[in-house]
Image: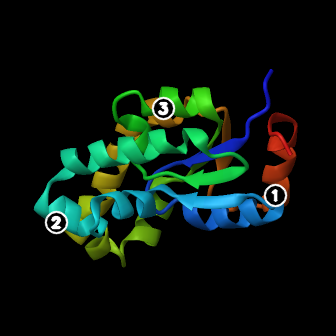
Amino acid sequence: MQKASKIFLIGFMGSGKSTTGKKLASHLTWSFMDLDEQVENIAGMKIPDIFSQRGELYFRQIEEVALRKTVSESRTVISTGGGTPCYKDNMDFMLANGLTVYLRMTPALLKSRLSESTDERPLLNNIDKRALSDFIAQKLEEREKWYSRAEIKIDGSFTDISDLYSMIKNRISE
């Protein structure tokens, strides 16, 4: 088994991919990359603006370009967008080019984390607060077939970096 030189963190929006990614990268003394920031750099605009001006399909196309550019990265922890694994063959790409870690969370916990930031999240922008639980549960169910393909699945509600490191240490190149 070849050891991975990059780690892709996947999971629903609000699952803690960026926070966990920064902590893990620091623990490993690796670089950290937020794929959403790469999308914004390529597009030259913020993600909410991409969605409102160009639409989700354009966003997904730019996201795919940003993901493919990570092929040259090494010793990097990459936080992906919640929908990244579900578009085209992005999950296959991540599985072939690094170690994938799914930060799994319940719909109830995701709702509590996301309910105050719906304005900043384009997919939640027009969702009524009362319908948020159902929307999250439905989206999570749709995406689970991609998320569940990750090589490592952990509880995202309490991610101990030392525990995560123990799970991945034999699968990464240090």
Q: Is residue 16 visible?
A: no
Report which residue position mark 3 lands on.
91
Q: Which residue is mark 1?
A: 28
In this view, the residue in front, 107 or 139, is 139
Q: Secondary structure at mark 1?
A: helix
Mark 2–mark 3 CB contact (< 8 Å): no
Position of 18 with respect to 77 (left or right) is left
| Viewer-side label of 3, 1 | 1
Q: State the CA–CA distance, disc 1 to disc 2.
A: 39 Å
**SS at mark 2?**
loop
Neighbor class of circle 2 (other Cα within 10 Å; few <14, some 14-19, many 20+) is few
Residue 144, position in %: x, y?
Answer: 45, 36
Q: Residue 101: give x, y in percent of width and height.
A: 64, 43
Residue 126, labelled with which disc? 2
Q: In terms of secondary structure, where does tag 3 sit?
A: helix
The answer to whether marks 1 and 2 mark residues whose Cβ atoms lie closer than 8 Å is no
Q: Amino acid at mark 2?
A: Asn
Residue 46, by quadrant, is: bottom left
The quadrant in which the N terminus is found is top right
Residue 170 position in % (x across, y down): 87, 36
